[in-house]
């Protein structure tokens, strides 16, 4: 027997009240500062294979994107507005779609719109994020940092199964087998604090237990409050259908309406967030740090390239690309 989870919406009214009271910032890709145009055939962001594009930015959110356009390969995050969740013989053609058939609609006050059953309303052409966990490309291949450089308190996010793994889990394909008893497919959300410590939240997107396949089809709300104050979020995936070269189940998921609020400006962590300043002079290749006793520069894979107590770092010798500078409670993305 297959059990399909359409949505989890028990806490939506509480979230709506909190939005107004606590000034929660909710991801809304219609406000994106990255120019988002979409392919008419498959709904993907037309910059997906453009090697010059480095992120999808909206409000305070910066979703890291990487690609090798020559090989039609991408990893990290891209955007989509596809509403087509129909199963296809060529599985790669629907890697940009989700099973809920679109992104989540917001009310005029910025809260999530719900139907008569309390489930999130999806809308045609409402954009959402698609994540691909390309674990061989980098340490943190599916990464999100804050474009405003501030620490934020994690609140919640909606996640959904991408159509590609959904049908592989149910039917299998040339690379992945259909799930059987004992199989499980999970998404883990990692919150990285200013001191590089991590907390995680695990989400089960599909599981086969006692003869029943339970598989997520609608937008599922995930409470992220246990992650606390974070400088960065990154996402990993796992499947029991794995082999010598990693997961056989395609490592895709969809994300929408990520919610955070700015970290408190009171207390020790607030002082650190307020005092630390990061600036970058592209002409000289110098990163300047003010108000923090320690800083580090990482690549988008999460590898630390430079660190120390210096007030300046010369990155002129590093290859062109995107880097993350972390100091105090600040985390800033720079493009060299």
Image (tube, helix red, strand yellow):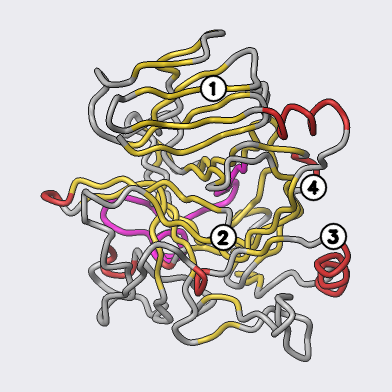
Question: Which residue in the rendered view is the most extreme toward the bottom?
Answer: 116
Label 2 vs label 1: CA separation? 24 Å
SS at badge 2: loop
2 vs 1, front mark: 1
Classify mark 2: residues with Cα within 10 Å, few (<14), some (14-19) or many (20+): some
4 vs 2, front mark: 2
- Percent across and percent down for residue 162 are 46, 64
Q: Which residues are magenta?
A: 164-189
Classify mark 4: residues with Cα within 10 Å, few (<14), some (14-19) or many (20+): some
From the viewer's side, name the closer residue of 22 and 79: 22
State the residue position of label 4.
Answer: 225
Q: Quadrant of residue 160?
A: bottom right
Label 1 vs label 3: CA separation? 30 Å
SS at badge 1: strand
Measuring 56% from the left and 60% from the top, which residue is drawn there? 59
Residue 11 sits above or below residue 175 on the image: below
């Amino acid at each position: 027997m297959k059990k399909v989870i359409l949505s989890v919406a028990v806490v939506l009214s509480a979230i709506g009240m909190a939005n107004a009271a606590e000034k929660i910032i909710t991801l809304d890709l219609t406000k994106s500062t990255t120019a988002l145009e979409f392919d008419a055939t498959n709904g993907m962001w037309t910059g997906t294979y453009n090697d010059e594009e480095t992120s999808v930015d909206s409000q305070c959110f910066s979703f890291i994107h990487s690609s090798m356009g020559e090989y039609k390969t991408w990893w990290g995050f891209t955007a989509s507005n596809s509403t087509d969740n129909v199963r296809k013989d060529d599985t790669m053609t629907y890697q940009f779609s989700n099973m809920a058939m679109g992104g989540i609609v917001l009310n005029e006050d910025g809260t999530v719109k719900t139907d008569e059953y309390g489930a999130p309303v999806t809308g045609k052409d409402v954009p959402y994020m698609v994540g691909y966990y390309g674990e061989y490309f980098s340490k943190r291949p599916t990464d999100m940092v804050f474009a405003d450089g501030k620490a934020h308190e994690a609140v919640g996010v909606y996640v959904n199964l991408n159509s590609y793994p959904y049908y592989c889990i149910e039917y299998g394909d040339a690379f992945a087998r259909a799930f059987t008893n004992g199989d499980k497919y999970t998404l883990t959300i990692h919150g990285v604090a200013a001191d590089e410590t991590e907390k995680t939240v695990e989400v089960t997107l599909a599981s086969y237990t006692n003869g029943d396949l339970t598989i997520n089809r609608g937008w599922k709300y995930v409470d992220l409050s246990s992650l606390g104050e974070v400088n960065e979020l990154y996402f990993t995936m796992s499947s029991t259908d794995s082999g010598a070269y990693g997961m056989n189940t395609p490592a895709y998921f969809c994300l929408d309406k990520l919610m955070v609020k700015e970290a408190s400006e009171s207390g020790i962590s607030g002082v650190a967030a307020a005092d630390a300043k990061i600036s970058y002079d592209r002409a000289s290749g110098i990163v300047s740090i003010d108000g923090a006793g320690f800083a580090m520069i990482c690549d988008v894979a999460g590898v630390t390239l430079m660190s120390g107590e210096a007030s300046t770092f010369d990155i002129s010798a590093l290859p062109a690309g995107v880097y993350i500078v972390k100091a105090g409670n600040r985390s800033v993305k720079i493009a060299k």
